[in-house]
Each structure stands twice: as structure tokens, then as C-alpha cells.
Image: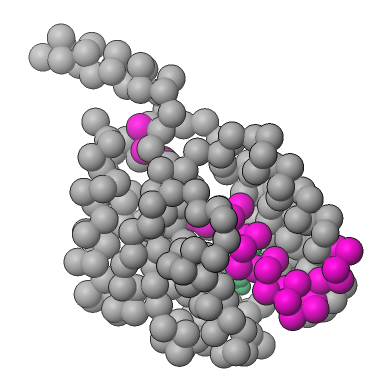
Amino acid sequence: GICYEVYRQFHKMSISKSKPFTVFVEGNIGSGKTTFLEHFRQFEDITLLTEPVEEWRNLRGWNLLDLMYKDPAKWAMTFQAYVSLTMLEMHRRSTSTPVKLMERSIYSARYCFVEHMMKAGTLHPAQFAVLDEWFRFIHQQIPIEADLIVYLKTTPSVVYERIKKRARSEEQCVPLTYIEELHKLHEDWLIHRTHAECPAPVLVLDADLDLSQITEEYRKSEHQILRKAV
Ligand code: DCP
């Protein structure tokens, strides 16, 4: 009755003051991060921060993602600088729910994408140095909550076919080798732990499964994510 409702509201208020259980959803391009987050829309008390890519496609009318793919040497730095900002903004966004689910993080930007662009020579070493100094400063000075990373593990050829099928205009010229490189960098970061920094425990899911079977796989993570919800 009303007592329970009062209790529930009070409980919510007290939880909102404490830190939410924060989950990053990571995985290669086309691994189904958005679909994974959408699966959790059915539950109450979860804040979903989906599709940061839409911000990268429209900054005051500019499509930074498109500029980056069309002329990486000129735009990679600008693009990654803006990705870092949008990620930091998501990390800092306060929630009134006990669980916060985010698509990607400032870590995958640094350890997968910027790392690749540095190794491939797309970023000049000086440009890389500036991005890396920003990353270190943020990492050391700004508290970033991380309780769990859900890694949607895929096979490069599988996501390559998905990317071709979904036909996002900017990604038309993405070669399989790029997807393979990104896969390796995700594995290095989340499985082989080659960077000192892996900010939270990693739950690995098989994201090669197609849409008809993936819900079962997603369910495997519900327990770990929802136990924190009221
Ligand atoms: N991207 C990038 N640098 C980053 C993050 C992303 O160049 N630091 C690019 C790669 C993709 C696009 O942005 O072309 C979006 O990639 P994501 O993997 O973040 O998002 P998707 O929409 O592909 O994820 P999913 O299909 O798993 O939902």
C-alpha cells in the first residue's frame, strides 16, 4: 500500500545519492552494443546511455564520423578529441537509478581506436601525444565509475558481414583488416590485459549469435546487472 510506496521512493532517493552500478558495453563495430542495451529497456531502474555515435554524426550539423572516414589523416585527431569529450560527458552524467548502462567508454576510445590510429600512422605521433596526455589527465584527475564491463565478443568476419548489411553510409569503405585489427585490440585490452588499466571485471558474451538466439545470451548477464537494481 501507501507505506510501501513511501518506502520505495525513499529507498530510490537514498540510492540516487549513492553511486550507480555502472556497466560499460564494449565490443567491435557491429557487435550489437545498441541491441544489448535495448534489451534492458524492459527493466525499471536502469539508465541507458546508447548510441554516442549519433552525436559524432551531428555536431552542430557536422558529421565528424564521415569526415574522419573520408580523410583520416586530416580528421582522426578532431574526431577522437570529440569522442573523448562525449564519453567523459556520459561518464559524468548523474542518474537517479541504481544501475547505469553505457555504450562504450573513454577506455575503448583510447585503447582500441586511438591505439590503432597511432600504430597505423593515421595519427601523427605529436597528435597521439596530445590525445594521450588528455586521457592520462582525465584518468588521474576525474573519478570514472566502472563496476562491470560486458564484452560482446565476436569474430571479425561475422561483424564485417553485419556492417556491410546495415550499410551505415560512413562505414562503406571499412576493410576487413581494420575490423580484424580492432578485434585484436579489444582482445588485448579485455582478455590478455596488456594495458595496466582494465577498470572493472569483464563478462564475456558470445555476440556472434544471430538475433533469434542472442536474447538467451544477453540473459546470462541479467543477473549480474540487475542484482543492483531495486
Ligand atoms: N569509432 C571510432 N572511434 C571511436 C569509437 C568509434 O572511429 N573511439 C567509429 C567506429 C564506427 C563508429 O564509430 O564506425 C561507431 O562504432 P561503435 O562500435 O561505437 O558503434 P556501433 O553502432 O558500430 O555499435 P554496435 O553495432 O555494436 O551497436
Q: In which quarter of the image is the C terminus?
A: top left
Place of residue 150 in the rendered image (x, y in percent of width and height, measured from the top left): 38, 58
Place of residue 50 in the rendered image (x, y in percent of width and height, measured from the top left): 49, 53
What's the image's color scheme?
one colour
Instruction: Give residue 140's quadrant in the image.
Output: top right
Q: Residue at x 29, y 13 (%)?
A: 10
Relative to 182, is 18 above or below? above
Relative to 162, is 126 above or below? above
**The stretch drawn in magenta includes residue 214:** no
Q: Which residue is drawn at 41% across and 43% down?
A: 147
**Which is more toward the observer, 90 or 141?**
141
The span shown in magenta is 98-127
**Which is more toward the observer, 111 or 171?**
111
Q: Residue at x 71, y 47 (%)?
A: 136
Place of residue 194 in the rendered image (x, y in percent of width and height, measured from the top left): 54, 65
**Which is more toward the observer, 2 or 75?**
75
**Which is more toward the observer, 92 or 63?**
92
Place of residue 3 in the rendered image (x, y in percent of width and height, measured from the top left): 15, 9
Relative to 218, is 15 above or below? above
